[in-house]
Amino acid sequence: MSREIKVGGAQLGPIQRADTKEATVARLIALLDQAHEQGCDFVVFPELALTTFFPRYYMESKDEFEPYFEREMPNAATRPLFEKAAEYGIGFYLGYAEIAQEEGRTRYFNTSILVDKAGRIVGKYRKIHLPGHAEYDPERSFQHLEKYYFEPGNYGFPVWRMMDGIFGMCLCNDRRWPETYRVMGLQGVEFVALGYNTPSVNSQRPEERGEERLFHSDLSAQAGAYQNATFVAAIAKAGNEDGNPLIGGSIIVHPSGQIIARAETEDDELITAVCDLDDTTFYKKTIFDFARHRRPEHYGRIVSQTGVELPE
Ligand code: CDV
């Protein structure tokens, strides 16, 4: 018997700084309504899906930046999304900025959650590969202050059993690192949900434009899917946020590495694909049968070193 799930990739258009969370959640629910009409079982929303991509702004005071974060989930603003999803029987992935009280201090994470068809949070992931910089950089045309606002995630890359499959999560820059997928691949992952906010311009290399940025986004998701025999849904927040363009290009990738759905716009747009999780089996049992073919005795450098060590 096949294990088909119909997946909706709910790309979001821009969220402006002045937009309220309530208005944004109404847009998420409109996409969920479409997903319901199209028979989806699971919907993937982007990274930081409730706010503008605020790490582009330098805010010194907590009073200014904490409103971009969520202290609990669900909360007053997001509860309608959870309720509607449970009513429809649709599971979802959602990215947001999280404030946690842990180890006797306030901690800030770039977080995503996995919600089952009953509206229960079954998994939480905190972004590990935080790009950008930790201090205001006057040389840049715009900031990328993820290392200032967040600390690296402390949960690793777990996977969860849900909907008769094995689900994993990551966030944006994580998609560019093969380790992200391989750690989940080693736990048998069959479906990776990931949301992203990727500026269309590289602030340190202005000649690198949107087309090249899209190519790298596709390349990373397709390689991760193929090399780990898993579906990957890479879903953008796109378009022009207060003068700051973000790439779209949301895709759903088959374990063969081929793209099976792609967004055409930079707006709110639902893409869908039927993902038969049994399609992962062939690759997991042949070319990427890890138990037979991996040689971890030669991979020590991957976990013992971060930077490059040049030969003598
Ligand atoms: N939100 C992100 O993690 N964005 C990064 C930066 C480097 C553009 C990305 O990898 O897309």
Image (cartoon, rainbow, N blue to C red):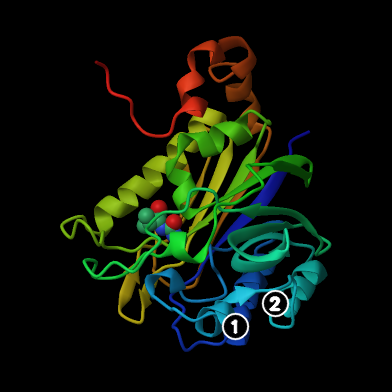
Q: Ligand 1 is located in which of the four quadrants?
A: bottom left
Name which residue type carries label 1.
Lys
The residue wearing badge 2 is: 78
Q: Secondary structure at mark 1?
A: helix
Identify the residue at horizontal 70%, vertical 41% (top origin).
159
In the displayed structure image, the side of residue 213 where residue 130 appears, left or right: right
**Point 55% across, 30% down: residue:** 228
Q: Are marks 1 and 2 in contact (CB under 8 Å)?
A: yes
At 65% from the left edge and 63% from the top edge, which residue is drawn? Answer: 38
**Residue at 74%, 83% in the rendered image:** 76
Dividing the picture into quadrants, the one containing residue 27 is: bottom right
Tell me the kind of residue under disc 2: Thr
Which is more N-terminal, label 2 or label 1? 1
Q: CA distance from mark 1 to mark 2?
A: 8 Å
**Neighbourhood count class around disc 1 (C-alpha, 10 Å): few under 14, some 14–19, many 20 upward:** some
Let me know if residue 130 appears in the view. yes
Of 127 and 122, the residue lying toward us: 127
For label 2, count other residues whose C-alpha is less than 10 Å away and answer few (under 14), some (14-19) or many (20+).
Answer: many
Residue 64 placed where, x, y %?
Answer: 51, 84
Quarter of image, res 137: bottom left
Q: 116 or 136, which lies in front?
A: 136
Residue, disc 1:
21
Tell me if residue 245 comes above or below residue 102 in the rendering.
below
Residue 58: percent from left, percent from top: 39, 75
Q: Mark 2 near ligand 1 (CB under 8 Å)?
A: no
Expressed as whole percent of the image width and height from the top left, the position of residue 197 reads: 44, 63
Q: Which quarter of the image is occupied by the C terminus?
A: top left
Residue 295 at x, y percent in the picture: 53, 12
